[in-house]
Image: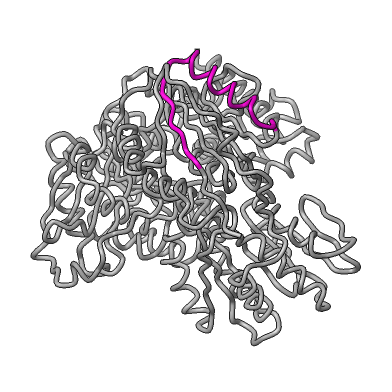
Amino acid sequence: MSLPQRHCWIIQGDTEWLYQQAYALYQSVSSSSCFWLSDAEHTNQAVHVKQAHQHLGQECELLLFEVSNKFDADAFGAVVGCVKAGGTVVILLNSTLSSTRWLRRFLRTATDFPAIQQFHQPQSLPSISKLHAKNITTTIIEPTQEQEQAIALVQRVVTGHRRRPLVLTADRGRGKSALLGMAAAELLKAGKQHVLVTAPSPANIQTLLFHAHQQLPSSKLSATSVTWQDAMIEFMAPDAILQAQPTTDLLIIDEAAAIPANMLEQYLIQYSRLVFSSTIHGYEGTGRGFALRFYKTLDKLAPDWRALSLQQPIRWGEGDIVEQFCFAALLLDAEPIDSQEIDAATLNELNYVQLEQGQLLNDESLLRQVFGLMALAHYRTRPSDLHMLLDQPDIRIGVLRFQGKAVATLWTIAEPQLEDTLAQAVYDGQRRLKGHLLPQSLLVHTGIIDAAQCDYQRISRIAVHPDFQQKGWGQYLLKCAVAEMTDDTDVVGVSFAMSEDLLHFWHKAGFETVRLGQHRDEVSGSLSVMMLKALTPRGQTLVDKARKILSCQWSFLLSRQWDELDAESVIQISQTLLDDETFSIDVLPQIQSFAFKQRPYESSEWALWQWFRSQLSSPGFEQLHKEQQQLLIMLILQGLPFDKAAKQLKLSGRKQIITQLRKAVSQLLDFEADISS
């Protein structure tokens, strides 16, 4: 039986009228079959759009998506996939919304689909009950022919030759998680004892567990496992698997594109029977970039890997109009220009242009080319990035074109000087700005208060057509873009997940390493690195100072914060450091900011270590309580982890330790001040 089409309405009006329409629609169906999301706080029935993820893995007949402030494209892309066949998506747009380029394009795209109905206040709405087909069941009981093929391939991973992993890809609604659950159940029926499943969170595998449970009579279902007789299908977090390395008959990695690439590579090394599953044109913005990169890793580590792409929708009908509209409106299916059309391109024939946002709005083909380049180049190009591309006021969009076709693109964000009072608040950890990532990072993490006095351009994204990389196009694009910045920019900078190739690329372009991150990137699993290039004398002074500070801190922080950095990266960065024996750093401002304000501990750790070494023999140190002395020594000198220090000192945890540490440091500073006066 073919499944019925889903429907979509777009309704525009004022706040009160929209609420009346939404409430009437909500009342017309069972509350359990309606998801109501809103960015307003006016009703108990609606869930805030920021909580949209709580609906993932569930189904509804009616989705009410109410927009009063700004259209959350990521949330919309996530929940629209919850609407099952025959259901209706209702988008309620407040008349007070700004007419952004993104919104104008969204509404224009809707007019390309006659089945998308649009209503304006005070039009009457038709009865929604007539649209909804009765007794439509999309819960899979028997697998389709395509799913049976996939289940057989999953079983072959376990019963066939080792090191022949399977990669399953599909758009949403194709029953990918369901078939994985059915396949896992069949393995248990065949006598296998353990199937291990991992994903970004347990919420991602609820469909998998449910369908496994359905296939196993008398099995026990929990939020993280299915137990049947003496066998188990069990969830384990991605990092926990690498730490524990449990034995298993099969490891299933669901939503693999959202798991750090280095973890996926470790799974390939440690396990011989694996299934990777990923969404391609998803709201997460991960699938296509994942495929491009990870397939190369598979070719290297498991050259006999197999792939299967699922095409037939299970949750809604073939040619579903809502899916087509979402793909078009959110550019989920944007692709770069076909490589055959630019096959003759050479570097000398490329033209650099800086595009206006209005050009992209009015040229859909160009917009899809530019956005498609980013979708393939970056794991996390999301629908909200289209918002940024079309509407962010301080963005510059550089493009290399061949015969009018976009073959490479670079986006930069202006980050101008900060006012002195604001800069001090950022330095002290009392303000965290939205944007201004480069000066903010230099203020907070390197302790350069002068960083606020420069004008920056931050390179947000750069992408070269995947079939034409390693040809010098990226370097040429950078050179052209930077040449356009010299009149109003002191420093151009970039932050990225560190790799040997990327460090080499940016260093070749004249960028210098000034900072490493304190936490690993959630996509790549690598530490982030920040690199800067000076364009003016003022910018050069700043970059040199930042490099010298990194050089001073390098050996200390390698053992404290970057102890897992691989040897190749340590060598590569060490060779670019700017040593200067005459350079000295006044650490006292950082110590005072930590003690009396809210400057982060990790940002102050080196300064505290430099300062505290001379305090051990001071009269002020002798005045401290024994517990305070122990705390200072354990954390600052010995570098004990917070959990160990808390246990030894009988403190509740990190928060209490930091509070006590600030108090002890402030007492030492006060004692020094009293002596000086």
Image quarter of residue 256 = bottom right
Q: Is residue 463 visible?
A: yes
Residue 97 lies, in percent from the top left, at 38, 22
Residue at image position (41%, 46%) is 325
Q: Farthest residue toward the front?
A: 130
Q: Quadrant of the N terminus?
A: bottom right
Residue 51 lies, in percent from the top left, at 60, 34
| Side of 298 relative to 203 (left or right) | left
Is residue 277 or residue 635 the one in the foreground? 277
Residue 649 lies, in percent from the top left, at 78, 36
| Side of 261 relative to 179 (left or right) | left
Please say whether residue 26 is one of the residues in the magenta stretch: yes
Name above or below for residue 66 compared with residue 612.
Answer: above
Q: How is the image coloured?
A: one colour
Residue at image position (27%, 38%) is 542
Q: Is residue 447 visible?
A: no
Image quarter of residue 621 = top right
Q: Which residues are magenta?
A: 7-31
Image quarter of residue 436 = top left
Residue 194 lies, in percent from the top left, at 79, 70
Please say whether residue 622 is one of the residues in the magenta stretch: no
Is residue 171 or residue 304 the one in the foreground? 171
